Image (cartoon, grey):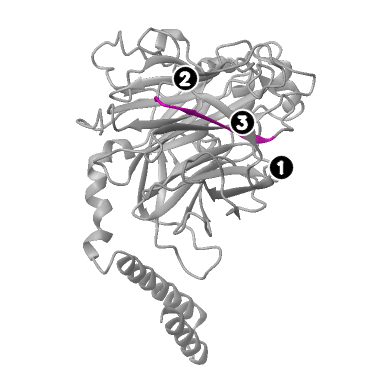
Amino acid sequence: MSRISLQLMVRYLSGSRCSPSVVVWSLVGFLLSLHLYSLVSHNGGKVGDVQFHTSHHTLFRELEEVEEENIQIPPPKGKRSPRAAKRRPKRPTTLIDEFLDENSQLRHVFFPDMKTAIDPMNDSGNDSFNYYPGRIWLDTEGNPIQAHGGGILYDESSRTYYWYGEYKDGPTYHAHKKGAARVDIIGVGCYSSKDLWAWKNEGIVLEAEEANETCDLHKSNVLERPKVIYNEKTGKYVMWMHIDDANYTKAAVGIAISDYPTGPFNYLHSKQPHGFDSRDMTIFKDDDGVAYIIYSSEDNSELHIGPLTEDYLDVTHVVRRILIGQHREAPALFKYQGTYYMITSGCTGWAPNEALAHAAESIMGPWETMGNPCVGGNKMFRQTTFFAQGTYVFPLTGLPGSFVFIADRWNPADLRDSRYVWLPLIVGGPADRPLDYDFGFPVWSRVSIYWHRKWRLPSGRRGLK
């Protein structure tokens, strides 16, 4: 119906004696009306649903009032580190160069020292439940949390949150001259919390193999981005992760299972899903219990997505290629009001880059790119995802459309000192970019990640389930 109306209008205007400007503005007005109609239709004709986000945003208004950053690059002082000099030897220094330079005078801006650490067991009262993106975050024993590239699982039976991630508390080195910075596999760390702020160290739930060099988990290999989901049918906790060799040529996924969220997890095997190379990956469990794997493939030039088997221990034969030729990695999926959203990063190794948000009405696609979701900081902060790389997004129960975006601020000079960037993510407001595959605007809302040096969850939203 809308296509026919548009064709009739274009035909009428083209046959009239209206000026070009009148024709253009008439088409704009028609498209805006059509977009409003599609929003109302998408919500079952309930105009109140279209206005929902306005009232909802009052709860998060303080988080939408973003902070700006004005960081001045200091004049050169002494020699720059070889890493920074090699990256841009003849160009003016940028904030990214300063970020990557462990000798930079701005080092404390990106990686504050232990004096400013978030310590849930020794807070000053006013700092309780505050998140400080980029600061050292201590567990309940006073040690820096080691859960990089990780994800959050809420366990219904224990009413507890579990945070799984790469345990990188080891020395950073290069396996060979041209190799990427790395830490030997130590294992997957697990932390538990009732309030998403104070985290108890539950230990290493999947440990590295010290002796057997043929084992996927041998310390000389690579284990990245572990994610855990619970299977109600089997009663098992299932972990998927990126498994690779030191040269990143194996490009596989690994699977492990446990009877308990705190492990120990039993490693089963690795494989290349659907016969394709697989690097950065994640797992998403839908409302109906079906779980999906999403992974970067074809040398990171595209993403693949497909459902897992009912026991979550393997992939099925169904797979779709998405974001072909866009070179995206670090996928983080979430869902709101029947629409699937995803945050991805570019492919620049340990260096930060621009995040993009994507959306789809079906998890299998087609997926549309919505643009950069980052708001606040400054231009360079937004173009570098606040000098971090996304790994997971989880919803805030009781606040529809509100989520927490979890990212890692990688420190390639000392990977164990990489930091966590937790920020509020809100789905709301009209999309600001037209569809790629159709003429018109999508019915889904835009995604915004708001920068804050300091923030906390709205009162009463701690211990959210």
Q: Position of residue 445 (x, y in %)?
A: 38, 55
Please name the predominant secondary structure of the magenta segment in the image: strand
- At label 3, the amino acid type is His
Q: Quadrant of residue 62?
A: top left
Q: Position of residue 324 (x, y in %)?
A: 64, 53
Q: Is residue 161 left or right of residue 246?
A: left
Q: Position of residue 418 (x, y in %)?
A: 53, 20
Residue at 37% across, 55% down:
338
Q: Which residue is mark 2?
A: 264
The vertical placement of 219 against 353, above or below, is above
The residue range painted magenta reads: 251-260
Q: Position of residue 30 (x, y in %)?
A: 40, 76
Q: Looking at the image, do the residues carrying marks 2 and 3 touch, with CB atoms under 8 Å apart?
A: no
Q: What's the distance in space between the residues labelled 1 and 2, CA to CA? A: 33 Å
Q: Which residue is mark 1?
A: 299
Mark toward the start of the polypeptide (2 vs 3):
2
Per the image, label 2 sits on a secondary structure element best described as loop
- At label 1, the amino acid type is Asp
